[in-house]
Image: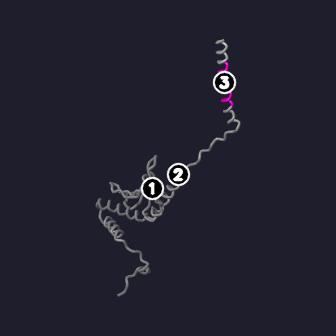
Amino acid sequence: MSEPETSGIHASQARPVRLRDALLRARIEAADRTGVVVDLRDAEVARLEILNDALDPLFAQVPEQIDLFDRGISQGDTPRLWIDVVAHIVMGRDKRMYRFVQDTRFGRIVLAESHDTAVIVEAVTDYVARRMIEREHAMVVLPEPKPAVPAARRRSRIWPFLLGFILGAAALFGVAVLAVLRSW
């Protein structure tokens, strides 16, 4: 018996085939063969799951203390792969194109669009890096500059106090002298 050919790759070097990946590919192929809406939706979810798996190495590198990203697939009318609260990936109209979008104050903007998962993974990587830098800048607290107060200005606050104290003491002394003179 001859060994199955692995395209020049030794059996020890071959990447292990995961059943989950095979099931996802089978769902996509089944959806491609049929025109049923449910199958198309399943194909969308399957494609988003494939992309989600492709993003695992990226999010494994994000430090645990950074909690900006909450990745997951929502199974609503339009399946979405959420990256964070403002950015997600949806399938395009042809159900084969990934569309990476971000919600902003001015509406939704498309950050990347491609049939290729590698292009979307690169766009998400750039987005994650930018968000982490924005977080770093937001976390930096700059010390407030203290205004330079010249020594003459500090003294100018002491002189009015001393003048008021002396005038108040002189007025009290004058009132006391008047009281003594009237009482004689």
Q: Residue at x 45, y 56 (%)?
A: 67
Inspect the magenta stretch and tell me whether residue 110 lies in it: no
Q: How far, Cα to Cα, is label 1 from label 3?
A: 65 Å
* Magenta stretch, residue numbers: 159-174
Residue 110 percent coordinates (x, y)? 45, 54
Which of pointers 1 and 2 lies earlier in the amino acid sequence? 1
Give 178 or 2, whichever is nearer the viewer: 178
Under circle 2, the secondary element is helix
Q: Amino acid at mark 3?
A: Ala
Disc 2 crowd, CA 10 A, few/some/many (<14, 14-19, 20+): few
Under circle 3, the secondary element is helix
Q: Which mark is residue 67?
A: 1
Disc 3 crowd, CA 10 A, few/some/many (<14, 14-19, 20+): few
Task: Give the quadrant of residue 98.
Answer: bottom left
User: Residue under circle 3?
Assistant: 169
Q: Is residue 89 above or below residue 161?
A: below
Give 23 or 109, whichever is nearer the viewer: 23
Q: Quadrant of the C terminus?
A: top right
Q: How far, Cα to Cα, is label 1 from label 2?
A: 13 Å
User: Residue under circle 2?
Assistant: 139
| Whether label 1 touches label 3, CB < 8 Å | no
